[in-house]
Image (cartoon, grey):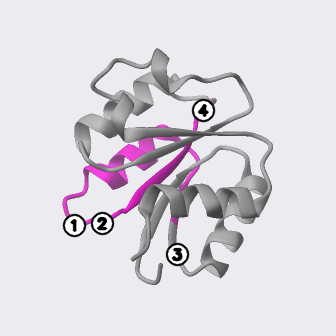
């Protein structure tokens, strides 16, 4: 886990603080953004390195599916963990996006997030 970098896209400030604290405790490096525009700007930077995106689907500046499409276009092999309080089905996405996306229902416990990330990234 050390050295693995996670991009968080979440507009709820308190949740960002909790996610940041928990993921750092697990040994991840964290970069958090509260808007889709800022996060996409970070992903578009060729010098930025991420191993996983943890994204909320309910951002005020971009619909969730549009955000996923942009992430997948910018970084075609970067896994994305969608975290949402609303129903979400990976199978409802266009087929070319489905392999890159996983889902975790909000609310979740910190250990559930850690387990899901480990499941996605595997051992280092």
Callouts 1 and 4 close, C-beta under 8 Å: no
Front residue of 121/28: it is: 121
Place of residue 57 in the rendered image (x, y in percent of width and height, measured from the top left):
58, 31
Disc number placed over residue 105 in the picture, else none: none
Front residue of 75/99: it is: 99
How much space separates mark 3 and mark 2, taking CA atoms? 13 Å
Q: Which residue carries the number 4 mark?
A: 59
How much space separates mark 2 and mark 1, taking CA atoms? 7 Å
Dot placed on the residue nearer the N-terminal end, 3 or 1? 3
| Residue 45 drawn above or below residue 73 | below
What SS does tag 1 mark?
Answer: loop
Place of residue 61 in the rendered image (x, y in percent of width and height, measured from the top left):
53, 29
Disc number placed over residue 49 in the picture, else none: 2
Dot placed on the residue nearer the N-terminal end, 4 or 3? 3
The residue shown at (66%, 80%) is: 25
Instruction: Nearest to the eye among marks 3 and 1: give it.
Output: 3
Q: Which residue carries the number 1 mark?
A: 47
Tell me the quarter of the picture where residue 74 sits: top left
Callouts 2 and 1 close, C-beta under 8 Å: yes
How much space separates mark 2 and mark 4, taking CA atoms? 23 Å
The residue shown at (37%, 44%) is: 40
Magenta residue span: 31-57
Place of residue 37 in the rendered image (x, y in percent of width and height, measured from the top left):
43, 40
Instruction: Nearest to the eye among marks 2 and 1: give it.
Output: 2
Callouts 4 and 3 close, C-beta under 8 Å: no
């Amino acid at each position: 886990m050390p050295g693995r970098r996670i991009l968080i896209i979440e507009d709820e400030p308190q949740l960002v603080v909790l996610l940041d604290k928990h993921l750092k405790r697990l040994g991840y490096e964290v970069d958090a953004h509260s808007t889709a525009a800022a996060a996409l700007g970070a992903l578009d930077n060729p010098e930025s390195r991420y191993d996983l995106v943890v994204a909320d689907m309910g951002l005020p500046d971009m619909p969730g599916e549009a955000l996923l499409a942009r992430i997948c276009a910018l970084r075609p092999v970067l896994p994305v963990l969608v975290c949402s309080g609303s129903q979400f089905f990976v199978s409802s996405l266009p087929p070319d996006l489905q392999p890159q996306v996983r889902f975790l229902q909000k609310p979740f416990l910190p250990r559930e997030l850690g387990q899901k990330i480990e499941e996605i990234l595997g051992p280092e």
